[in-house]
Image (cartoon, rainbow, N blue to C red):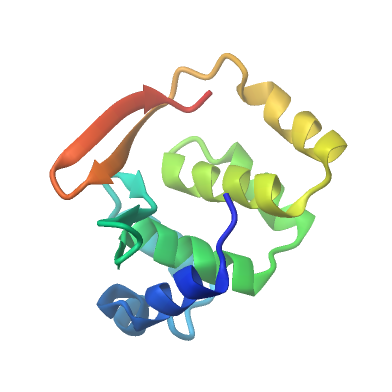
């Protein structure tokens, strides 16, 4: 995952971003993720960002500490917090560190729903 300047601009113009993400702190970010039913990036050729990618951009902006990342990874009740942390690790960390953080999830059976289009979803496991 890598967000370019155009994608960031599209996200920051999105209604969800303006209402829910501007000024959001980590505690509020956790609260918002409890409402998620799926994860997703963009729909319709990068024109419409999903709510999840808006929150992910805010998570990047907050630049969480390793302690927060580990807390998110250990969360057993909210898979979306875990996915945020795993994506952040993939984007920010070195290859060696990525492998160290990802290893515990190799055999994960935790299910997530990925939004592929307006009405198209894919059910998969976290691994």
Whether residue 63 is visible here, answered yes or no, is yes
Using the image, determine if residue 106 lies above or below residue 117: above
Percent x, y of residue 68: 68, 56
Front position in the image: 69 or 43: 43
Which residue is rendered at x = 28% and y = 30% of the image? Answer: 122
Which residue is rendered at x = 61% and y = 73% of the image? Answer: 61
Number of marks: 0
Left or right, residue 115 beside residue 57: left
Of all residues shown, which one is farthest toward the left? Answer: 119
Using the image, determine if residue 66 lies above or below residue 55: above
Which residue is rendered at x = 48% and y = 85% of the image? Answer: 23
Using the image, determine if residue 62 lies above or below residue 85: below
Percent x, y of residue 113: 31, 35
Which residue is rendered at x = 31% and y = 59% of the image? Answer: 50
Left or right, residue 91 beside residue 38: right
Whether residue 26 is visible here, answered yes or no, is no
Of all residues shown, which one is farthest toward the front? Answer: 45
Percent x, y of residue 94: 83, 45
Q: Picture quarter containing residue 31?
A: bottom left
Q: Picture quarter containing residue 32?
A: bottom left
Percent x, y of residue 101: 74, 34
């Amino acid at each position: 995952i890598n967000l370019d300047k155009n994608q960031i601009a599209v996200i920051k113009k999105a209604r969800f971003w303006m209402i829910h993400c501007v000024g959001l702190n980590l505690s509020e970010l956790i609260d918002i993720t409890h409402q998620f039913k799926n994860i997703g990036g963009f729909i319709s050729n990068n024109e419409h960002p999903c709510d999840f990618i808006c929150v992910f951009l805010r998570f990047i902006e907050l630049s969480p500490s390793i302690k927060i990342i580990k807390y998110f990874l250990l969360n057993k009740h909210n898979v979306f917090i875990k996915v945020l942390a795993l994506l952040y690790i993939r984007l920010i960390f070195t290859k060696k560190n990525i492998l160290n953080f990802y290893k515990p999830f190799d055999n994960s059976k935790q299910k997530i729903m990925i939004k592929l289009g307006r009405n198209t979803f894919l059910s998969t496991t976290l691994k």
